[in-house]
Image (cartoon, grey):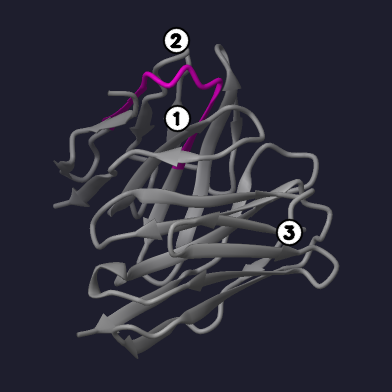
Amino acid sequence: KQEVTQIPAALSVPEGENLVLNCSFTDSAIYNLQWFRQDPGKGLTSLLLIQSSQREQTSGRLNASLDKSSGRSTLYIAASQPGDSATYLCAAPIQGAQKLVFGQGTRLTINP
Amino acid sequence: DGGITQSPKYLFRKEGQNVTLSCEQNLNHDAMYWYRQDPGQGLRLIYYSQIVNDFQKGDIAEGYSVSREKKESFPLTVTSAQKNPTAFYLCASSIVGRELFFGEGSRLTVL
């Protein structure tokens, strides 16, 4: 059974800092892992998808890494801005099933 | 523009009524999903479909029904059997095994 955990549940940092969000999963036999952003009252926006054959994926100021052996993924945000404030969720697939298990998310606040 | 359209955005229901949430996608994705989101509980899978005329129950299917008569459409009916239907409902789609995309959500409130 796949379980996905995100710690911390909330994080507040001053503008301009680099920061790392963590995602842990229990079943390492995954074929990909996806990171999302959710603004209040909105749907989820896909940020990055890392395939199991990759170790990193980058998009602008975002960099996601995947370490299957340790069951961990991290989302690195460089030079944070107030507009980065949102809830960030990671999701990993269940082996043998075409569906994802989501973490509870990390609520990020960037203070001007 | 390509994307996923959910309607209505807000919906109010009286107890004992069935309501249907619409989800339409023009991304040519085979797989479609319905999730429910409650404060402090994350996203929970209600139903999913990988092909037309076929769908599978997720983790919390009781009190819900779906149909998949067209590739583009995956409506969700919240029946009177669902005892606690007030929630934020999210529809998503993907090419099977690939990146998942979401609609903007529908907020259902039971009066």
Callout 1: 10 Å neighbours few (<14), some, many (20+)?
Answer: some
- Identity, as a three-letter code, of the amino acid under mark 2: Lys
Residue tagged 1: B65
Could you tell me which chain the residue with mark 3 belongs to? Answer: A
Could you tell me which chain the residue with mark 2 belongs to? Answer: B
Residue B91 vs residue A14, the one in the foreground: A14
Could you tell me which chain the residue with mark 1 belongs to? Answer: B
- Identity, as a three-letter code, of the amino acid under mark 1: Ser
Question: What is the span of residues highlighted in magenta in the rendered image?
Answer: B19-34
Q: Secondary structure at mark 1?
A: strand
Residue B77 vs residue A48, the one in the foreground: A48
Tell me the distance, in whole angstroms, between the alpha carbons under discs 3 and 2. Answer: 37 Å
Q: How many marks?
A: 3
Residue in the picture at 30% in, 80% down? A109
Residue in the picture at 56% in, 39% down? B99
Do the residues at discs 1 and 2 belong to one chain?
Answer: yes
Do the residues at discs 3 and 2 belong to one chain?
Answer: no
> B98 left or right of B94?
right
Residue tagged 3: A55
> B38 left or right of A94?
left
Residue B63 visible here: no
Image coordinates for residue A34, horizontal then vertical, percent: 58, 53
Image coordinates for residue A8, horizontal then vertical, percent: 51, 84
Q: Secondary structure at mark 3?
A: loop
Can you tell which of label 1 and label 3 is closer to the viewer?
3
Image coordinates for residue A25, horizontal then vertical, percent: 71, 66
Above or below, B35 against A69 in this view is above
Residue tagged 2: B70
Q: Quadrant of residue A112?
A: bottom left
Residue in the picture at 35% in, 35% down? B79
